């Protein structure tokens, strides 16, 4: 049985802060209409052989995923990058913060390439180092900083990860947020009233994990708004909170709504709602299952034929799952939610251009994190990679 109910939306619709970087692609970008693009990509990959390793995030387009040596969520791809010391080039088909993390976790002589430098992440852009330092200063002035462990979601720039490394904190991904929070609270056993976590940039992942997995209440959570004086919080609110959530969100996942969940339950008998933890708390509360992209894939793979699913995550992945599982009814959770436009910037022309440049001896779009940032960001990333095995939320 195949019932795929997916909206037909033009690629590239959506928030695209990556393009704010104003980065042009140097050299000759092949035309998207070039009928030889697939053959050119294949030829370049063959010519580079084991010198290149191609990583593909689950939100990438099919045309790019076809050339990935490994696909995964951001946690798996970080591990894969760290596990490929033999590859001279890591071509990262994903977004900027993922390529930065790969650069930090690979050896200095390895080169990480992002085929389009404008492939950023609007959520990562919502927490800037200066803003985070201001927040930390406010915590110091409120007399609580010594009880706080900063935890940043992988979807953040390298300098934010370095801030966490320098201040006793760690990185987490959607696969291991619960384990990372358990670790973080355990760092402050002597704090009066329990330790606190400053979590950025995604308030939804932070809140969903704290409330649904850690047993904290919504009253334990406050939201720090970097655009308001003192984050919009009083000293008493900071002192009373266990989770200080940064006011950031994903422009894609933040659009799924609780109303549509109700509508789908009323119209599709037995439908199970499966969402990414970047969705709002209201949506996650109404869902049957919540987890990272890797968890979503594993859940659908293990589901029985004939089962019905509505999935709240990026559209490229949902379409691919629907195509790969024609025996299951897979519906996109919302008609108005679009592709992640920055993930979509990595297309076949950019991939071919990056790969052919490497074949010709030119390294383009290399992502290089400076040594000092790298040192501290690696501390935070290594703390995450050393967390015990539980990696999926369910
Ligand atoms: P994962 O950590 O599940 O790969 O998600 C990354 C992401 O960008 C989600 O929006
Ligand atoms: Fe960033 Fe959201 Fe796109 Fe993921 S889906 S890369 S969090 S904007």
Image (tube, rainbow, N blue to C red):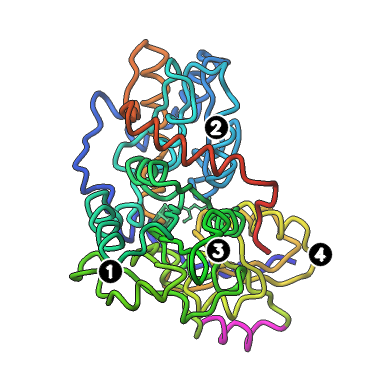
Most prominent secondary structure in the magenta stretch?
helix
* Mark earlier in primary sequence (2, 3): 2
Q: Which residue is mark 3?
A: 276
Q: Which residue is mark 1?
A: 225
Residue 391 lies, in percent from the top left, at 65, 51
Residue 263, quarter of picture: bottom right
SS state under label 2: loop
Residue placed most toward the observer, 160 or 52: 160
Q: CA distance from mark 3 to mark 1?
A: 23 Å
Residue at image x 62%, y 69%? Answer: 213
* Mark earlier in primary sequence (2, 4): 2
Q: Which residue is mark 2?
A: 67
Magenta highlight range: 260-269
* Mark earlier in primary sequence (1, 2): 2
- Tag count in the figure? 4
- Residue neighbourhood size for the residue with mark 1, other residues' Cα within 10 Å, grouped as few (<14), some (14–19), many (≥20): some
Q: Is residue 266 magenta?
A: yes
* Mark earlier in primary sequence (4, 3): 3
Circle on res. 304: 4
- Residue neighbourhood size for the residue with mark 4, other residues' Cα within 10 Å, grouped as few (<14), some (14–19), many (≥20): few
């Amino acid at each position: 049985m195949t019932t795929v109910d997916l909206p037909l939306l033009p690629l590239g619709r959506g928030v695209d802060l990556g393009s704010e970087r104003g980065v042009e692609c140097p050299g000759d970008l092949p035309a998207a209409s070039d009928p030889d693009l697939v053959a050119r990509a294949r030829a370049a990959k063959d010519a580079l052989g084991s010198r290149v390793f191609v990583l593909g995030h689950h939100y990438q387009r099919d045309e790019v995923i076809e050339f990935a040596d490994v696909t995964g969520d951001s946690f798996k791809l970080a591990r894969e990058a760290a596990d490929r010391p033999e590859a001279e080039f890591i071509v990262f088909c994903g977004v900027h913060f993922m390529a930065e993390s790969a650069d930090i976790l690979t050896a200095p002589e390895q080169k990480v390439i992002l085929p389009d430098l404008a492939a950023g992440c609007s959520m990562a852009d919502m927490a800037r180092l200066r803003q985070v330092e201001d927040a930390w200063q406010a915590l110091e002035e409120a007399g609580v900083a010594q009880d706080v462990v900063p935890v940043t979601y992988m979807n953040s720039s390298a300098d934010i990860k370095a801030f966490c490394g320098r201040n006793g904190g760690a990185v987490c991904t959607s696969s291991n947020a619960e384990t990372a929070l358990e670790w973080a609270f355990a760092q402050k056993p002597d704090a009066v009233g329990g330790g606190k976590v400053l979590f950025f940039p995604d308030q939804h992942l932070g809140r969903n994990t704290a409330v649904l997995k850690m047993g904290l209440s919504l009253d334990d959570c406050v939201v720090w708004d970097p655009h308001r004086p003192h984050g919009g919080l009083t000293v008493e609110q900071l002192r009373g909170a266990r989770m200080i959530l940064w006011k950031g969100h994903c422009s894609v996942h933040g659009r799924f709504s609780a109303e549509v969940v109700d509508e789908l339950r009323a119209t599709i008998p037995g439908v199970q709602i499966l969402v990414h933890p970047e969705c709002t708390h209201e949506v996650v509360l109404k869902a049957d299952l919540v987890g990272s992209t890797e968890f979503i894939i594993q859940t659908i793979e293990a589901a029985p034929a004939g089962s019905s699913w509505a999935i709240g995550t990026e559209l490229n992945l949902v379409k691919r799952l629907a195509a790969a599982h024609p025996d299951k009814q897979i519906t996109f959770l919302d008609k108005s939610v679009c592709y992640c436009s920055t993930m979509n910037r990595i297309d076949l022309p950019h991939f071919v251009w990056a790969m052919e440049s490497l074949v010709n001896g030119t390294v383009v779009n290399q992502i290089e994190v400076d040594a000092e940032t790298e040192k501290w960001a690696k501390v935070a990333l290594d703390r995450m990679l050393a967390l015990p095995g539980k990696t999926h939320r369910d």
